[in-house]
Amino acid sequence: MSDERWLDEDAGPIVPAYLLTRGRTVPASEAIDLIAVIITAGGLTPPMGLGPEHLIIMQKCTKPTRLVDVAAELNLPIGVVRVLVGDLHAQQLVQVELPPPAPDAKVLLEVISGLKAL
């Protein structure tokens, strides 16, 4: 088999995204919201056996970073990044801060009414 099948001149190496997660589509820990904030827990000395994508996520999340921003920076599908971050979270290598709950619809209607009154 030649290497031509796995290399594109413009894009570089072509690896299907599902190979990064070994075919998994569900995170190892609980579901992670798109706007959840990810931050590396502890130091940057990860255990052996992590893939390069896991290491890149840990490096990018030394400062609080939203899950969607991590996916955009890595140029990977959000589902893949969710699984990778879930792996790191299950091993307590990153912290996942969930977004605050959305305000009640009643509160939003009162705000809209107040703005219209101005």
Image: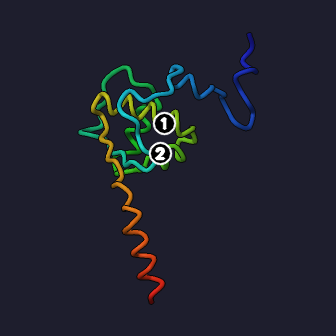
Q: CA distance from mark 2 to mark 1?
A: 8 Å
Q: Residue at x 30, y 24 (%)?
A: 47
Whole-percent x and y of residue 74?
53, 41
Instruction: Looking at the picture, tell me which residue is in the foreground, 34 or 61.
Output: 34
99 up-or-down from 8: above or below: below
Q: Residue furthest front?
A: 106
- What secondary structure is marked by label 1? helix
Whole-percent x and y of residue 30?
36, 33
Instruction: Looking at the picture, tell me which residue is in the foreground, 74 or 44.
Output: 74
Mark carried by residue 81? 1
> Do labels 2 and 1 touch, CB within 8 Å?
yes
63 up-or-down from 103: above or below: above
Query: Can you tell which quarter of the image residue 57 is in?
Result: top left
Query: Can you tell which quarter of the image residue 54 is in?
Result: top left
- What secondary structure is marked by label 2? helix
Give the class, few, some or many, for how many residues have Cα within 10 Å of label 1's Cα (few <14, many ≥20): many
Give the class, few, some or many, for how many residues have Cα within 10 Å of label 2's Cα (few <14, many ≥20): many
Residue 60 left/right relative to 17:
left
Amino acid at circle 1: Val
Q: Residue furthest top?
A: 1
Residue linked to disc 2: 70
Amino acid at circle 2: Val
Q: Residue at x 42, y 30 (%)?
A: 27
Whole-percent x and y of residue 61?
37, 45
